């Protein structure tokens, strides 16, 4: 018998993971109108000087001889910063008033001396291609200024860092810089007209959608004023909203982009027991996480309590994500939740997820509607509200040899399911599969005959969600499944009822 529990804040293990060890601290240094030292007139020193100048620094170059690249740089100047050439080698006085110091040292002795001089004056130092004498490193840069992305491998794999930069470059729209500049221009208006929290976050979510739409940023700001006004009307200060989000079968890679965006915009996440930790890791770190799981035969939250909590939080102005395993609209009680929210006048939307049956078919490499075997597929709940077999199901129809049947939440009912199907005329040799923890690291499989279903399911981890499939579509790949299963290989061949 299922006992009830109240929704609770999750244990620390289900909270966002703490920051792991960092090889170095990524920081973004403001250099506008500050002084920086570059020692050496080489081509490598010229590249570092150009970076400093692009960041707005007043770059002091100490070198008695100049490579053509450095000469060209000093003549051309910088659109943001400036260059001052000192036709001499650096000395201790060169570090006075400097914010950063960079050197292309000719010898190990010079590198050590430069580093020691920086330490003595409190100036962070980078000796090019000499990590022991570096307080900081230059990573690969993706420049969509004012959006700037730095990539560091802590000096151990610069080629890898460059490859990562190229990957990121292909993901970011070329017009992103224009949108970032526009964000700076409209920020004051957003702060003035929209309230902190959900209103402002909803505006910036809509703004981000536009920024990644491949459209060019508008030169005039009027359209953003309209968007600000629409946001305020769409979400009043004390009016939150609820989004029912499908978390998929387990693996975070099955999440849709829309689901990730919903998680990133949530104030509170009400999630089921079966939602994987790696999915929760993609949520906004500041979001509260509330465990509201319902498990057959176990301590569970009442649906009425979950509905009440969604209503209460939304009326506090919170953006609530109701995170469900699989797809919210497939055995997820979404209909009851949507009905209650609409009755209360709370905006509600749905983000579909990959349902477990689709994931199982993909994992097994079996089409549920292979045209040589099945012309229809049925999703059936494995138990009723009373914890028994559902009586409203047309069980005789499930024995149709041209139909693939997938039972959700049927682990505890496996023996009764097989007995009922055989009583309705299904062959005891009908191929069946059962998979627990679909798409997760803990996934386990069993395959066999319908008459052995209960014994087969008992070999799986029923603490994980279990899906049962029955139908001739599973016959062609049964041998391959059996090789991976924890159950014994069958002694005699499968006979399929047609």
Image (cartoon, grey):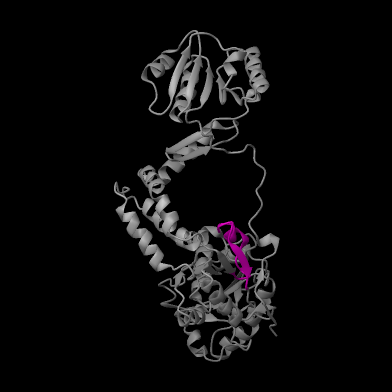
Which residue is found at the position 53% from the left and 78% from the top? 331
The spot of residue 408 in percent (x, y) is 56, 77
Measured as percent of width and height from the top left, residue 184 is found at 41, 46
Residue found at the very far front of the displayed protein: 192
Can residue 373 be seen in the rendering of this structure?
A: yes
Q: Does the magenta stretch include residue 212?
A: no
Nearest the eye: 289 or 402: 289
Residue 59 to residue 240: above or below = above
204 versus 153 height, above or below: below
Q: Residue at x 61, y 24 (%)?
A: 125
Q: Is residue 117 left or right of residue 267?
A: right
Residue 278 is one of the magenta-drawn residues: yes
In the rendered structure, the answer to whether residue 467 lies left or right of residue 60 reads: right
Q: Is residue 101 left or right of residue 402?
A: right
Up-down: is 332 above or below 63?
A: below
Taking depth in this image into account, of 132 and 465 the one nearest to the observer is 132
Give, as a single range, the part of the protein colored magenta: 271-292
Residue at 31 percent across and 55 percent down: it is 223
Percent x, y for residue 229?
Answer: 36, 62
Quadrant containing the N terminus in the rendered view? bottom right
15 over 173 or under it: above or below: below
């Amino acid at each position: 018998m299922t006992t009830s529990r109240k929704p609770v804040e999750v244990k620390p293990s289900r909270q966002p993971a703490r920051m792991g060890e960092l090889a170095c601290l990524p920081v973004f240094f403001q250099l506008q109108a500050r002084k920086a030292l570059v020692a050496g007139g080489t081509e490598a020193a010229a590249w570092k000087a150009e970076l400093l100048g692009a960041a707005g620094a007043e770059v002091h170059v100490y070198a008695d001889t100049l490579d053509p690249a450095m000469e060209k740089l000093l003549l051309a100047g910088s659109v943001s910063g400036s260059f001052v050439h000192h036709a001499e080698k650096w000395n201790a006085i060169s570090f006075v008033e400097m914010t950063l110091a960079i050197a292309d040292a000719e010898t190990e002795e010079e590198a050590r001396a430069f580093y020691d001089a920086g330490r003595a004056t409190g100036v962070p130092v980078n000796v090019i291609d000499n990590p022991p004498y570096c307080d900081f490193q230059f990573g690969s840069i993706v420049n969509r200024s004012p959006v700037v992305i730095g990539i560091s491998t802590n000096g151990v794999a610069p080629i890898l860092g460059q490859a990562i930069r190229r990957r990121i470059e292909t993901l970011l729209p070329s017009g992103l810089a224009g949108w970032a500049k526009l964000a700076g221009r409209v920020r004051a208006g957003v702060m003035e007209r929209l309230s902190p929290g959900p209103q402002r976050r909803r505006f910036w979510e809509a703004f981000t959608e536009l920024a990644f739409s491949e459209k060019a940023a508008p030169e005039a700001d009027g359209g953003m004023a309209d968007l600000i006004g629409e946001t305020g009307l769409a979400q009043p200060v004390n009016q939150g909203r609820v989004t029912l989000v499908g978390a998929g079968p387990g693996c975070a890679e099955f999440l849709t982009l829309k689901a990730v965006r919903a998680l990133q915009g949530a104030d509170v996440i009400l999630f089921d027991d079966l939602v994987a930790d790696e999915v929760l890791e993609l949520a906004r770190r500041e979001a509260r996480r509330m465990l509201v799981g319902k498990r057959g035969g176990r301590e569970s939250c009442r649906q009425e309590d979950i509905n009440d909590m969604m209503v209460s939080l939304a009326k506090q102005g919170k953006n609530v994500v109701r995170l469900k395993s699989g797809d919210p609209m497939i055995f997820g009680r979404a209909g009851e939740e949507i009905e209650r929210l609409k009755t209360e006048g709370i905006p509600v939307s749905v983000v579909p997820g990959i349902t477990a049956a689709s994931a199982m078919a993909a994992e097994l490499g079996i089409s549920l509607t292979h045209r040589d075997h099945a012309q229809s597929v049925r999703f059936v709940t494995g138990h009723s509200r009373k914890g028994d077999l559902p009586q409203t199901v047309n069980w005789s129809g499930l024995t149709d040899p041209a139909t693939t049947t997938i039972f959700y939440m049927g682990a505890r009912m496996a023996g009764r399911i097989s007995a009922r199907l055989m009583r309705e005329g299904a062959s005891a040799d009908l191929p069946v599969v059962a998979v627990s923890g679909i798409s997760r690291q803990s996934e386990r499989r069993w395959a066999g005959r319908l008459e052995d279903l209960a014994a087969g399911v008992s070999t799986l981890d029923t603490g994980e969600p279990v899906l049962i499939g029955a139908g001739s579509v599973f016959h062609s790949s049964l041998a391959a499944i059996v090789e991976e299963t924890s159950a014994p290989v069958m002694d005699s061949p499968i006979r399929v009822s047609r």
